[in-house]
Amino acid sequence: MDGKLIVFEGVEGCGKTTQMKLCCQWLESLGISVMVTREPGGTELGLHLRRLLLEKAEDKPVAQVTELLLYAADRSQHVEQELKPNLAAGKYILCDRYTDSTIAYQGYGRGLNIELINQLNYIATGDLKSDLTIWLDVDVEVGLTRKLSGGVRLDRIEQETIAFHRRVQQGYADLAASYPSRIVRVDGSLSQEAVHQIIQEILRGHLKNLP
């Protein structure tokens, strides 16, 4: 069986972690070999980069282009060390964020040049695209409220302004409109079980070799 790269995207608190766990359990119940990973932080090097990217230092903020390049470095290592070998081994990879996150967050959110981001994404991935991207669409205020209610300390990106997160959300909407065959919107405001059932239906429709 050919490997597949299935990416989960969305604003903060959209439910990616929960839905990836449910999806992993479901696919494994079908006898499919599954790998769960994330960006940033899907490799040992990536864990160090994740800390640099998400920990907030008030006196020494990360420059926007530096942030972009660190995400590209994390992705390059992730693709070569984890994604390509596991896809070649026939695994289904569930990945928390990939190239669309960089366009949404650094392009729309930060206002960096989209063409530059596309070039860096191409270099970092060798043009490895997702077979399917699930966009869990929730209102940004709802997502951030979920985060806060979970009792976790917000990271550097999560602490950005509401206006920033709304620009990110618009980025996802524009990407979904531009790539409808690859990116599928799912209403993330529904119940966990309802969202999971919708994702099952999407995967069965897009990945024809599912049992």
Image (cartoon, rainbow, N blue to C red):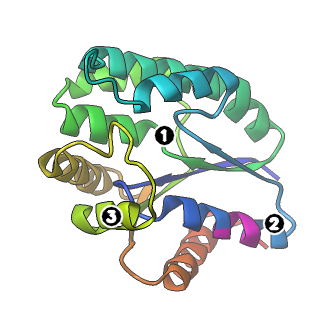
Which one is earlier in the sequence, the residue at label 2 or at label 3?
A: 2
- Which residue in the protein does label 3 denote? 143
Image coordinates of residue 210 in percent, x first then y, are 74, 68
Tell me whether circle 2 and circle 3 mark residues in contact (CB < 8 Å): no
Q: Which mark is residue 151?
A: none
Image coordinates of residue 130 in percent, x first then y, are 54, 45
Q: Amino acid at mark 2?
A: Glu
Q: Amino acid at mark 1?
A: Tyr
In this orientation, which residue lies closer to the viewer: 205 or 94?
94
Magenta region, residue range: 22-26
Local crowd size for mark 2, using a 10 Å CA cut-off: few (<14), some (14–19), many (≥20): some
In this orientation, which residue lies closer to the viewer: 53 or 85?
53
From what the image shows, is residue 140 above or below residue 118? Answer: below
Give the residue drawn at x 23%, y 42%: 160
Which one is earlier in the sequence, the residue at label 1 or at label 2?
A: 2
From what the image shows, is residue 156 above or below residue 193? Answer: above
Residue, far right: 31
- Which marked residue is nearer to the observer: mark 3 or mark 1? 3
Give the residue drawn at x 69%, y 24%: 44
Name the main secondary structure of what is drawn in magenta: helix
Q: Is residue 101 left or right of residue 161?
A: right
Q: In terms of image quadrants, where is residue 23? A: bottom right
- Which residue in the protein does label 2 denote? 28
Tell me whether circle 3 and circle 1 mark residues in contact (CB < 8 Å): no
Q: Is residue 53 left or right of residue 78?
A: left
- Which residue in the protein does label 1 denote? 98
In this orientation, which residue lies closer to the viewer: 151 or 7?
151
In this orientation, which residue lies closer to the viewer: 113 or 131?
113
Which element type, helix, strand or loop, lies under badge 1?
Answer: loop
Local crowd size for mark 1, using a 10 Å CA cut-off: few (<14), some (14–19), many (≥20): many
Residue 56 in view of the camera? yes
Mark pair 3, 1: CA separation: 19 Å
